Image: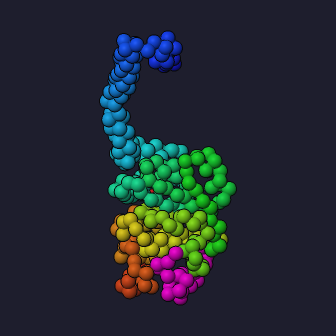
Amino acid sequence: MKNNNTTNTKLILLHPYIQKQGGPNRLWLLAFVSFFTLTFLATLIYSRDSILSPSRPHADLHRDAVSNSDNLPLPATVVNALIHYVIRSNYTYHMQQPDIKIVADVLRKCSVPCNFLVFGLTHETLLWKALNHNGRTVFVDENRYYAAYFEEQHPEVDAYDVQYTTKASEMKELVASVKEQSRNECRPVQNLLFSECKLGINDLPNHVYDVDWDVILVDGPSGEWPDAPGRMSSIFTAGVLARSKKGGSPRTHVIVHDYYRDVERVCGDEFLCRENRVASTNMMAHFVIERADPNTFEFCSKCNQTASADASPARTTSPSS
């Protein structure tokens, strides 16, 4: 219809018969028809804009509402349902409800978006991803094949592998080496990407070191036998990342699972510090680490170190549930 109208208009304005008639009446007729045509087109355009414009504010409001809802944390009912079905599963090795609740409570109070770093791909991996709704969640695992498989099965999960070179049986020597190098390679505040500290993880993708992590969960690597990697590196790295934050919240929540074991308890006390521990269960310890000055060379206060030295040996078997 638009093409036909345009063609007719051109015929009216440019028709040879009208052009040949040079009388005043014909000229007035030509002017009148031209004016009527232009007025009709202007009215049509204005009417079209008037019809469409009222819907635009509604679309913008709807888009803003959707955007705002996306930034909200999961409702408590959804969180409770997720936790319920995880702990009710038939999988043998999974966290108990009190331990999961510590992580869930921290994530719920975290500002959106929340940056959540997890050492270990476990039975709870998809739960952690879901609980940190709209946040950034990154997983680090010792098994490159499992990490690749997990990402293939769950493309929404961001996982990387790390090749640990430590052994749980070497814990005492490795902790001692950190103390000797606390003013050099093993500083509490540094960019681990360029570190040569034996316990520093420096082979993650570069962008991982640029993120200001709000919550770090240490639930890997494995440490059940002497030749297992142990969690010395992941606990040390968590402590350094927390103290080395450049922006965001000045505090980082570091949660260590299997805290009843020697490696987790000793390294937690050495690199996260008892003075920073705010909650614990039989299996879990929750620390809050403050951002530190670049010239800091001690992980913990002297009082904390004395308490750690005088502490009785940690249990090496899992407590009864």
Please state the horizontal and vertical placement of residue 108, each as a whole percent of the image. 36, 53
Residue closer to the observer: 160 or 127: 160
Q: Is residue 130 left or right of residue 157?
A: left
| Residue 290 can be seen, yes or no | yes
Please state the horizontal and vertical placement of residue 104, each as a whole percent of the image. 40, 54
Count of all numbered marks drawn on residues in the image:
0
**Residue at screen point 37% across, 73% down:** 290
Q: Residue furthest front?
A: 23
Residue closer to the observer: 109 or 33: 33
**Residue at screen point 57% across, 73% down:** 193
| Residue 121 can be seen, yes or no | no
Which residues make up the magenta segment? 168-191
**Residue at screen point 34% across, 31% down:** 53
Q: Quarter of the image holding residue 192?
A: bottom right
Q: Is residue 83 magenta?
A: no
Q: Is residue 79 above or below residue 186?
A: above
Q: Quarter of the image holding residue 101?
A: bottom left
Q: Is residue 255 above or below residue 72?
A: below
Q: Is residue 185 left or right of residue 310?
A: right
Q: Is residue 169 above or below residue 17?
A: below
